[in-house]
Every structure is written in structure tokens, then in C-alpha cells.
Image: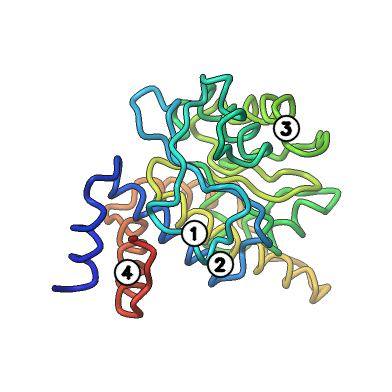
Amino acid sequence: MSVTNLAARGRSNLPYYEERMDLAAAFRWTARLNMHEAVANHFSLAVNEEGTQFLINPNQRHFSRIKASDLLLIDGNDPETMNRPEAPDPTAWGLHGAIHRNCPHARCVMHVHSVHATVLASLADSRLPPIDQNSAMFFNRIVVDEHYGGLAFEEEGERCSTLLSDPKTRVMVMGNHGVLVIGDTVGDTFDRLYYFERACETYIKALWTGQKLRVLSDDVAETVAGQMDGYPVDNAGRHLQELKAILDEEGSNYRG
């Protein structure tokens, strides 16, 4: 029997097992791309219709070790969450709990301090201009948080969640902090996080040259963003499936 089938048979009693596997794979690949930071940063995925119940990574577990069975299932409306024996990180609860309570369209939430997105968040002007196809796909779909107030405990998390009220906004550049990306599924969100980091890298390296930037017009940038929104093939879903296939071929235990 294949590694995949063995893992699935052994863990089939876990609630939301398929969702857990997808999220665990995203953690593993984020670490491989060096977009994680120590045992900080958090990913979450809503599992009920209202979006208030969600899976999230356990406190102080390295992304490269997270398995499907490790993920915590918590409720954003439960005030006793932080009194649980296996409570999540306080900032994970503050930020992700608020977003899942207040933004039901944010089914999946990924927050990292990846290098190039954090460099962008550290600039006085943290906007991402449409200088290539990757950056153009985010045109008018980013909000910049200009009012960082410290660690994302509950009050700061509530404030941040208000910036994502428009379903069209899928990326929040967290000034002086990092980046937060939302989406419909794990694949959709991870793909967006991946391309945003790539777009930020291109922009930052273009700035290094000191040359004048070739910025697309607003009309062209919006056209590209709209085309990506309505792309006829599920590239994001396929991206995650390919990453899971690679992990499976390597014998990874992320499904466990």
C-alpha cells in the first residue's frame, strides 16, 4: 500500500482530515521556501459555514514538523480558548480569531514574516507597483496597514480584521510587521502567498538597480488582475497537489 493510502487509513477518523493534510503540506512547503520565522507565524482554515471554527497550527511548533494530526480545532467565538491545555499562541488567537469571527469570506488565513514582503512592509511607501505580471495580479487587491500598534493580541487583531472587510482585498501588507493573505482554500491562499512574495522580491531587486521602473498603466494592471481572478484553470489547486505529490515521493510524514 502506498504511503498516501497508509496515512489516510490510519488517520481517517480525524475531523476535517483532507483539510488538515492540505494545511500541513502548506506549512512544510513554506518552511522549505524559507518564508517561515522560527516557531512564530500562523496559518488557519475555517471549517464551518460561518467561518468561526478553524484549524490552526499548535503553539511553538516548527512549520517543517507540522502534521495533519497536530492542527488545533478551535472556535473564534469561544472566550475560553486561551484557557485550554493546548491553547494556540496568543497572537495567533488574537489575529486569526478576530479575522475568522469578523470576515467570513476569509476561509483561509496565512500570516508570515517572509523576507521580501517584510522589506516592503518596512518602507515608508509599502505599496506594490505593477511592474510585472506577478505584481499586476495584486493591483487594487492589497490593503496597507499604516497603524501597527504592537504584537497582534486581541485588540490589535480586532483592528487588523477591519481592514479586510472588502472581499476583494486578499492581501494585507502589515506595516512594520509582515504580510497576511486570505483566500477560499488552502491551495488558493498558499498560491497567492507564494506569488506575492515573488512579486515583492522582483520589486525590491528592481529598486536595488537604481534604474527607473517600468510601471504598467492602471488599465493594464487591472486587466491582468481581472484575468488572474477569472483564470479558467485551477492553477492554485494544482500547485498544492504537485507540492503534496513531491512530499509524498520524499516520504514526508505531513499526512500523519
Q: Is residue 208 above or below residue 27?
A: below
Q: In the image, what residue occupies the spot 81% across and 37% down? A: 148
Q: Is residue 4 above or below residue 137?
A: below
Where is mark 2, residue-wise?
A: 31
Q: Residues within 10 Å of mark 2 (few under 14, many from 20)?
A: some
Q: Quadrant of the N terminus?
A: bottom left
N-term-proximal mark, 1 vs 3: 1
Nearest to the observer: residue 130 or residue 80: 80
Confirm or deny contact between disc 2 and disc 1 (CB under 8 A): yes
Q: CA distance from mark 2 to mark 1?
A: 6 Å
- Amino acid type for the residue under numbered disc 3: Phe
Q: Is residue 187 visible?
A: no
Pair 2/4: label in front: 2
Where is mark 1, residue-wise?
A: 27
User: Along the horizontal axis of the image, is 68 left or right of 120?
Assistant: left
Residue 242 is labelled as: 4
User: Along the horizontal axis of the image, is 73 left or right of 248?
Assistant: right
Q: CA distance from mark 4 to mark 1?
A: 15 Å
Dot 2 lies on which element?
A: helix
Outermost residue on the right side: it is 124
Q: How many marks?
A: 4
The answer to which quarter of the image holds residue 96 is top right
Q: CA distance from mark 1 to mark 3?
A: 22 Å
Q: In the image, what residue occupies the spot 39% across and 63% down? A: 254
Q: Please, which colouring scheme is shown?
A: rainbow
User: Along the horizontal axis of the image, is 81 left or right of 68?
Assistant: right
Q: In the image, what residue occupies the spot 53% across and 61% down? A: 134
Where is mark 3, residue-wise?
A: 153
Confirm or deny contact between disc 2 and disc 4 (CB under 8 A): no
Q: Position of residue 209 (x, y in %)?
A: 79, 76
Q: Is residue 176 above or below residue 154?
A: below
